[in-house]
Amino acid sequence: MDQFVIESTKKDVAPKAMKNGLTRFEEILEHNHGVLDNILHTLDPKLHSLGYLFVLKAKISDSRKNQQSYITQVINFIQVATSEQIKAAPVHCKHLGDLLHQLRQPARGVLPLKHAICALTDRPSQLTPIHSDFLILCILSKSYHVAMPVITNSITDVNPEQTSIAIKDVLAYFYYAGIVFATMKKHKQALESFKQVWTAPAHALSAIAIESYKKYYLVFLSVHGTTPGFPKYTPFVVQRTIKNHCKTYIDFGTCYLSGNMAEINTKFHQNAETFQKDNNIGLVKLSIRSIHRRNIKKLTQTFMTLSIRDIADNVKLSPADAEAIVLKMIEDGEIFATISQKDGMVTFHENPQSFSGHSILNELEQQINGVVSLETKLRAIDEQFSVSTPYLKRLLNAEKKMSSQYDSYF
């Protein structure tokens, strides 16, 4: 153990080199739980962050440790750790989320893991192994607003060599991001996040792709009023088999397209247990409510004024429910209208936004800058691939294969 402390406290050693040196002590640490707290007292969590992190990781397997004290140790460490050092072993930070999940204390880990993400990344576009742990804690603790600033950043930097991130971490991140977006009623962003999961390159169908497609399917119904298709880049195995695992949802979508509210509600009640089991009951109800909202929106294209009772008759609702939906649609900016409390008449208006103010121009400029930045990153990635050794070897092998096939004809 003395040698481990010496290695951990060396100065002027690159974090990556120090990590390689400390890795050989991992098994020894895990077999000497009794001295781990003494080592932690010897090390400074800020000056010797990498060594401190290795000891905390070794304590995971200690069944006799005080769980609450251990969580406090980890949280305090994350708040003071030197980012340059822990960047050398980002995957070691993952265990906090799992532990808090097991102890049913997700709220305690939300802010520490958000702090850890900031420490492990150089820019908001980077993805790390702990992003998905952070999001699941936000979902379990219902701290969706804390997750929003993180997931609204476009992810364009996924580097397994630098962060030790695995494909399951990437898929889990986008899946949980979709759940947060859907909960916060950011449905278009939710669709994009869920789609990232089931359109990711794959040779076999995964459980997370199936669950993501179910949620995508329901949100798509709510937003567009129709069933989704497959983008051209969808893996063949997904196109061929995923609907076989989502038959309840496909049947519901077919019924949904009929527009018959009685049949839709019957189909919903018949499969309510399945929807509940999949934690999708809220999205199914949202898709049903969207039918009424869409029908009300159609009325604004035909009438200038209409009574609440007439609206209710058109969309097959009670006047009270129809008024509540109209008020909510006005509040959400879906329609522009005023309701007269005197006679119950609804007057529909044109969109007051002129789309010519400074705010619109600033937003347009931000969007253009974002596209230019993304194009620059894509060019850099393309150049990196074109000179990489594995790519050149594959290209050379392909050319040799084609040449041999050509020669065999003569």
Image (spheres, grey):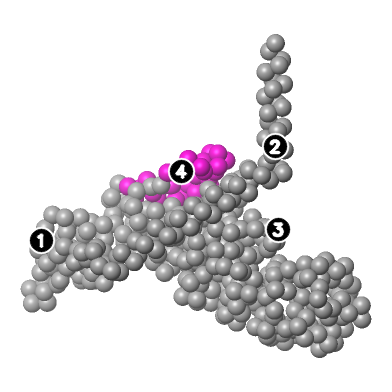
Q: Looking at numbered disc 2 in the image, what kind of residue is underneath it? A: Arg
Q: CA distance from mark 2 to mark 4?
A: 29 Å
Q: Looking at numbered disc 1 in the image, what kind of residue is underneath it? A: Met
Which callout, 3 or 4, points at the residue further toward the start of the chain? 3
Which is nearer the eye, 211 or 10?
10
Quick one: SS at disc 1? loop
Labelled disc at residue 304: 1
* Residue receiving disc 2: 394
* Residue receiving disc 3: 161
Q: CA distance from mark 3 to mark 1?
A: 60 Å
Q: CA distance from mark 3 to mark 2?
A: 21 Å
Which callout, 3 or 2, points at the residue further toward the start of the chain? 3
Which callout, 4 or 1, points at the residue further toward the start of the chain? 4
Q: Is residue 117 above or below residue 165?
A: below
Q: Indicate yes or no whether the magenta region holds residue 333.
A: no
Which callout, 2 or 1, points at the residue further toward the start of the chain? 1
* Residue receiving disc 4: 230
Quarter holding the C terminus is top right
Which callout, 3 or 1, points at the residue further toward the start of the chain? 3
